[in-house]
Amino acid sequence: MIIVTGGAGYIGSHMVRVLIENGFETVILDNLSHGTKEVAVQTGAPLVVGDIRDPRALTSLFSHYPIEAVIHFAAAIEVGESVQDPLKYWDNNLNGTLRILETMRSFGVRNLILSSTAAVYSPKSDGPITEEDRIDPQNPYGETKAAAERLVEACRHAFGVSSVIFRYFNAAALEPSYGLVSHAIPRSHLIPAVLDAISGRIPALRVFGNDYPTPDGTGVRDYIHVMDLAEAHLVALKRLLKGEISGTFNLGTGQGHSVLDVIRTAEKVTGKKVPYRIEARRPGDVSMLVASGTRARQTLPWFPSRSSLERIMEDSSRGWGLI
């Protein structure tokens, strides 16, 4: 049995569907602060409503199911909010991970896949980021994820946790055939906001900054299809359970796209204009985040086959009913 924390949310719900399709018995642990029961039901996995910071909820879950591994998505993830409310992020992201590791130790569960982020890295404007690049988070979100990574590494040395840590770049899109409701996707993410602007759910897209040191002045990010992310976790899980792999891996494409690139692609795919306005930069944002995915390709091995910007926009637009 595999526990997926945050399995009623955006990435977690796609992961649960992929696990079930590949024969893994799966249970969702989610406090529904971001995920919903509707999404959990659509995955087909049992839902345990509980908080990763609650030792009693974790003990009950681990007692009830024969757990082989934990895939840990549950976290607070908004950069701007983390600047305004850092205590929430330290509590959720570090204390929650600590409680999971405590429970794993108590029940003799050794296998963990941790969802981390490119926000742990120092800003870099001269090429893709490798796993060896400097860790220097620029916001509390990244700081809490870097601390969670260090905690997992300490537990590997202390009591033999076998772990894979994935540093995501920008997860995007959805799998239209799953029928997972699009409101599971965080609306603060760029592509959902672009599509909300096209569909009239918001009056205009807010573009935060056009004075970055990038080709068109807007922030550049590496967008990866959520199904490519899920596939990487599946590959890692199979090998982790066999004792064949551990380590830290970037999950990205190696290709960066600016905010204006995303807007132009959305207009091309949907045939509709994106209303937008330029605003000041957000606190904590960096100019560019692009992955080197060499280690993941060579070691897992894994390759992002669905992550062209056009494919991401097509699948996203179908989820919004725009094409």
Image (cartoon, helix red, strand yellow):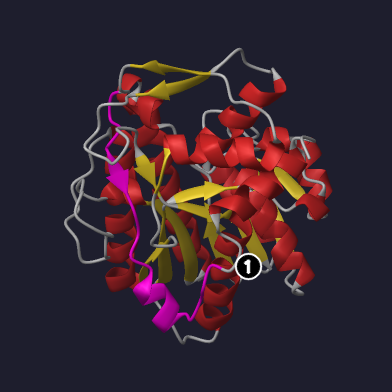
- Please give the range of residues in magenta: 283-304
Along the line of sight, which residue is nearer the eye, 58 or 275? 275
Asked if the stretch drawn in magenta spans residue 285, the answer is yes
Asked if the stretch drawn in magenta spans residue 16, the answer is no
* Residue 221 coordinates in the image, percent (x, y): 39, 46
- Is 290 placed left or right of 300 in the picture? left
Does residue 14 appear in the picture of this structure?
A: yes
Along the line of sight, which residue is nearer the eye, 56 or 186? 186
**Which element is circle 1 on?**
loop
- Is 278 placed left or right of 183 in the picture? left
Amino acid type for the residue under numbered disc 1: Ile
* Residue 231 coordinates in the image, percent (x, y): 60, 68
Q: How many marks?
A: 1
Q: Which residue is mark 1?
A: 67
* Residue 103 coordinates in the image, percent (x, y): 49, 57
Callout 1 crowding tier (Cα within 10 Å): few <14, some 14–19, many ≥20: many
Q: Quadrant of residue 78?
A: top left
Does residue 33 appear in the picture of this structure?
A: no
Q: Is residue 80 above or below residue 261?
A: above
Q: Quadrant of residue 64?
A: bottom right
Along the line of sight, which residue is nearer the eye, 106 or 49? 49
- SS assignment for the magenta stretch, majority: loop
Q: Is residue 2 above or below residue 191?
A: below
